[in-house]
Amino acid sequence: MTDETVAPASPAPTPNQKVWDAPVRLVHWLLVFLVALSWWTAEEGDMQLHYWSGLTIVGLLVFRVYWGFAGPETARFSRFVKGPGAVLSYASKLFKPDYRASFGHNPLGALSVVAILLALIAQVGLGLFASDTDGLESGPLSPYVSYEFAKDAGDLHEDAFNILLILIGLHIAAIVFYLVIKRINLIGPMITGSRKAESVEGPASGIAPVPLWRFLIGVALAALVVFLIVWVPTTR
């Protein structure tokens, strides 16, 4: 007889959990780039590029708001926007040993996401109606408001950017906190869309696919809004 030893079976690899769909990731990183570009063009006085950067942000925001109702689970506002009770409950569990990463935005992160989206909407909204003192650099919708209103919108457009910077800074600080303290990488899934499905909430397979037609409606809606902003003033 031969003495044969059986090697222990290697553990099955941890499956990947799909967390973020491609449209959410694309909008996220385009907003990162375009906010930086808008700041740089304003500093350099390249207002033509600033104009088109702002209009692109408008389109992205229109799509993201639409996708917050038509996208997959983790993109929907109803899925991650919670009340004060849920936020406090999540915060109380944050440092417990049995803490599990949220499936998508956690209740605290949702506050940051909503605040940044609202700040961006206010920022580009003011920019659409803004005008400088000489009226040489004006937003596309400034002809529809008074000179005083357009000038005030321009001043607020500049001042509100500081609020946006504070919100972005807090968002980055939260990402660093989760990476260093909780050992949870939030950036990787926002690039690849997936993460290892261990000690996390949600189904192991992650988000369900969304029909292509929903995405195309969102793109068409965003393009229509930008087109109307550019085209309507030319008809006056």
Image: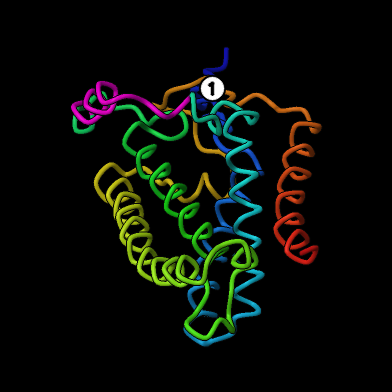
Q: Main secondary structure of the magenta part?
A: helix
Residue located at (51% from left, 27% from top)? 10
In the displayed structure, 186 sits above or below 5; it is below
Q: Give the range drawn in magenta.
A: 79-93
| Quadrant (top left/top right/bottom left/bottom right) for the C terminus | bottom right
Image coordinates of residue 122 in percent, x first then y, are 46, 54
Under mark 1, the amino acid is: Ala
In the displayed structure, 180 sits above or below 48; it is above
Q: Is mark 1 on a helix, strand or loop?
A: loop
**In this rendering, position of residue 116 left or right of residue 41:** left
Give yes or no for residue 133 being in the magenta stretch. no
**In this rendering, position of residue 96 left or right of residue 1:** left
| Quadrant (top left/top right/bottom left/bottom right) for the N terminus | top right
Residue located at (35% from left, 68% from top)? 159
In the displayed structure, 186 sits above or below 209; it is below
Give the camera-side residue of 27 and 189: 27
Q: Name the residue under label 1.
A: 204
